[in-house]
Amino acid sequence: MMEIERRQEEAQAHIRATIMNEFCRVMNQSGLPPMAVMRLAAQAVGSIYREVAETHSGPNACPCNWRPNEQTDVDVLCTALLAAIRFKPVQDLRAMRPIGSA
Ligand SMILES: [Zn+2]
């Protein structure tokens, strides 16, 4: 595995675990239903995008050279959300029973 892939997987696992912890905590403390809390999480990602995009625009933009492109960036975020929702891990073959067995 390439270094960049390893770092991406580590970052993904970290951010997922963090959001899952907070999701469960907010559900328990607020009593809000799952979709209400999911919506808050999605709104948080959108508002973080807005804030980061603003620090990368205009005369005092961050010097890292990333520049937001709202149209393609929104596509990237929506595609990532849909792909993650639709992804179903391949079933563990050891857990499958042969067809016809009781
Ligand atoms: Zn930057």
Image (cartoon, helix red, strand yellow):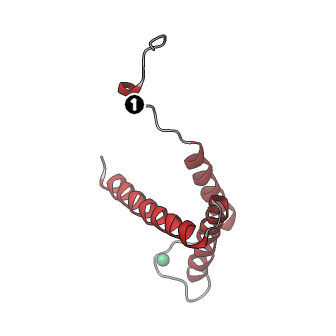
Q: Residue at x 60, y 54 (%)?
A: 81
Please state which of residues 89 and 23 is positioned toward the viewer in this rendering: 23
Q: Position of residue 78 (x, y in %)?
A: 64, 56
To which residue does mark 1 refer?
Answer: 92
Left or right side of 10 for 73: right
Examine the image and state in which quarter residue 56 appears.
bottom right
Question: Residue at the spot x=49%, y=74% of the render?
Answer: 65
In the rendered image, the vertical position of residue 96 relative to residue 24, given as above or below: above
Q: Nearer the viewer, residue 73 or 37?
A: 37
Which of 5/101 is in front?
A: 101
Instruction: Name which residue type carries label 1.
Output: Asp
Looking at the image, residue 24 sits to the left or right of residue 43; the answer is left
Along the horizontal axis of the image, is 93 left or right of 50? left
Give the residue at x 45% y 14%: 102
Residue 95 vertical placement versus 13 (above, below): above
Residue lying at 30% horizontally and 46% vertically, measured from the top left: 1
